[in-house]
Image (cartoon, helix red, strand yellow):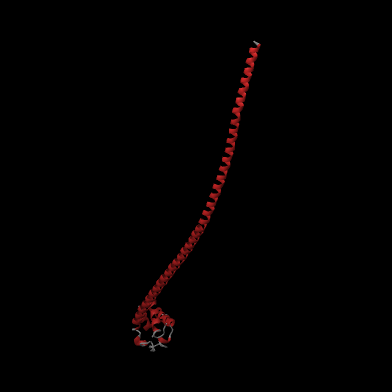
Amino acid sequence: MKKIFLSLAAISALIIQTGCNDKKEEQKPAQELSQNVKSSTEEVAKKIDTIVDNVATKVDEHINTAANQVEPMINSAVDSISDTTKSVANNLKESTNEVANTIKESTDSAAKAITDGIDKVSSSVENVLKTDAATLFKKCIACHGKNAEKLAPGAEVAINTLSESEIYEALSGYKAGTFGGKSQKTMQLQVKNLNDEDFKALAKYIKTL
């Protein structure tokens, strides 16, 4: 029995030893595979890093190249905009000056037309007044002469020797009864229907004779 037991124990030990050796043999390839996978992964990671760095470098180069190409275009566009702005400003200035000159010319023309119109009206008024004064003076010609040069009866001086203001004061005084000697009553009858404007017109007209 002891022999059988020892035999069985030896067989069992042999089997167990064989199994352990098999497990060790199986673990060895697994460790190697794991190490290989780790090494491969690291290599791949390094290659990926290298590729990424290369791509990044290329991208930077392209960006710099593009920036260098675009910069002159941008500068040219800015210069063009600046030139256009200056051109618009100059054109606007010229247009403004033209408008100002046109307005000035129109204003000057209008002012001249108004001045001419006023002169014509003044001339017409003067002519009317002169005509009326000439008509009024016709009553005076018999005593004072055509050019007011005669010495009228009772008068001390010819009226064409008097100033415009003196003639006006004399006519006003005749009508008011405050002026004149022997001829006062005669002159009152002559001027009783005349007014102050008539006296001014006559005084002015007489000095033109």
Could you say which is closer to the camera, residue 92 or residue 137?
92
Could you say which is closer to the camera, residue 27 or residue 141?
27
Does 97 sit left or right of 9 as displayed?
Answer: left
Look at the picture and state if 29 lies above or below 150: above
- Total of numbered circles in the picture? 0
Where residue 18 sits: x, y (%)?
61, 23
Look at the picture and state if 182 lies above or below 97: below
Q: Residue at x 38, y 79 (%)?
A: 201
Look at the picture and state if 14 lies above or below 180: above
Where residue 4 sits: x, y (%)?
63, 12
Quadrant the N terminus occupies:
top right
Where residue 62 sits: x, y (%)?
52, 52
Q: Residue furthest top?
A: 1
Q: Residue furthest bottom?
A: 150
Could you say which is closer to the camera, residue 189 or residue 91?
91
Q: Residue at x 40, y 81 (%)?
A: 204
Could you say which is closer to the camera, residue 86 or residue 157?
86
Q: Quadrant of residue 34?
A: top right
Where residue 196 sits: x, y (%)?
39, 77
The answer to whether residue 194 is visible is no
Quadrant the C terminus occupies:
bottom left
Q: Residue at x 42, y 87 (%)?
A: 161
Q: Residue at x 58, y 40 (%)?
A: 43
The answer to whether residue 46 is visible is yes
Look at the picture and state if 160 lies above or below 119: below
